[in-house]
Image (cartoon, rainbow, N blue to C red):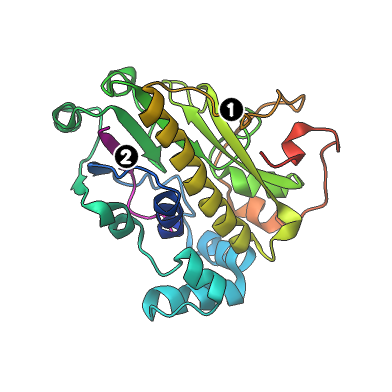
Amino acid sequence: MRIVVATNAYDTFGGVFAQAYREAGGPEPELVVVLPPRPELGFRTPAERALAAWKLVGPRGLARMAAARRLGRPLTRRDRAYGLQREWLSSLAEGGARVVEVPKLGDAQGMELLRGAAPDLLLSLGAPVIFPARVLEVPRLGAVNVHNGRLPQYRGHFATFWEVARGERVSCTSIHVMTPKVDAGEVLAVEGCAVAGCASFMDLMLEKKRSGGRLLAEVVRQVERTGALAPLPGRVPPPSTAPSGYFEFPRLADLRAFSWPAAGAVAKGDPAHHPG
């Protein structure tokens, strides 16, 4: 099966995701398409970046990142086992994938590249754009996105932040079919991570990267076996009664209001509380 990945170059914990995907037997991509970042999808000002580092990573997290990335010597056994020292793009290409940068997947250059790869499956891993229908129609079996939140409750950007900020006790990873509407396609699999089981927001992100890599590997292996996109048996919870919403990337005021962990705010009976 021919797999193309569309992504960006700046996934801080992407190496953890790639290692988990590979360990779970996920088929290797043949092509990695790297798209330019969108400045609005990130912490733009020095104040936002400084506050995000303090609130979401903290001094110990920054030390862990420095030891893993700059020195290549993760501080903890878990960080070493998870592959925190791994860089995103080099991890994706470890199996021999070709890595190509393009300004836009839907323009003439991007479409020529995509059609030339003749993918069976397109995987969006942090791709910073909404793909038009002409892109989604190229892969023979369809396109799949990994979303770091429960759908449809947490559509949009940086769902892990908003799940914690709104008091969810379980933070989810969802795999869904891509459509021209953001985060609106059929959900193929969901897995939850208990917020209380994580020592910090950074640890929650690492656990979700591990979870997402394994979950995507399950989805792709099923597609490889069956030749079709379909929900994983037992991996999609019943519909939730919680309202759905679309979330923008957090800004300075959101960071100031953020606390770890936030007090629980959702009814105990909501299926979003139960790991998939």
Residue drawn at x 55%, y 66% as measured from the top left? 53
Residue drawn at x 52%, y 53% as measured from the top left? 210
Callout 1, which amino acid?
Answer: Pro
Q: Quadrant of residue 140?
A: top left
Check the image and name the residue furthest to the right: 268
163 w.r.t. 17: above or below: above
Q: Position of residue 217 (x, y in %)?
A: 44, 42
The disc label shown at residue 233, or none: 1
Q: Return the residue at label 2.
A: 6
Q: Which of the image's four quarters has the C terminus?
A: top right
Residue drawn at x 74%, y 44% as measured from the top left? 166
Judged by depth in the image, the label closer to the viewer, 1 or 2, is: 1
- Is 103 magenta? The answer is no
Whether residue 81 is visible:
yes
21 w.r.t. 139: above or below: below
272 to the left or right of 211: right
* Disc 1 from disc 2: Cα separation: 26 Å
Q: Which of the image's four quarters has the N terminus?
A: top left
Instruction: Give the mark nearest the N terminus, 1 or 2.
Output: 2
Helix, strand or loop under label 2: strand
Q: Position of residue 189 (x, y in %)?
A: 56, 32
The magenta span reads 1-12
Say few, some or many: other residues with alpha carbon within 10 Å of mark 1 (under 14 / 14 to 19 / 20 or more).
few
Callout 2, which amino acid?
Answer: Ala
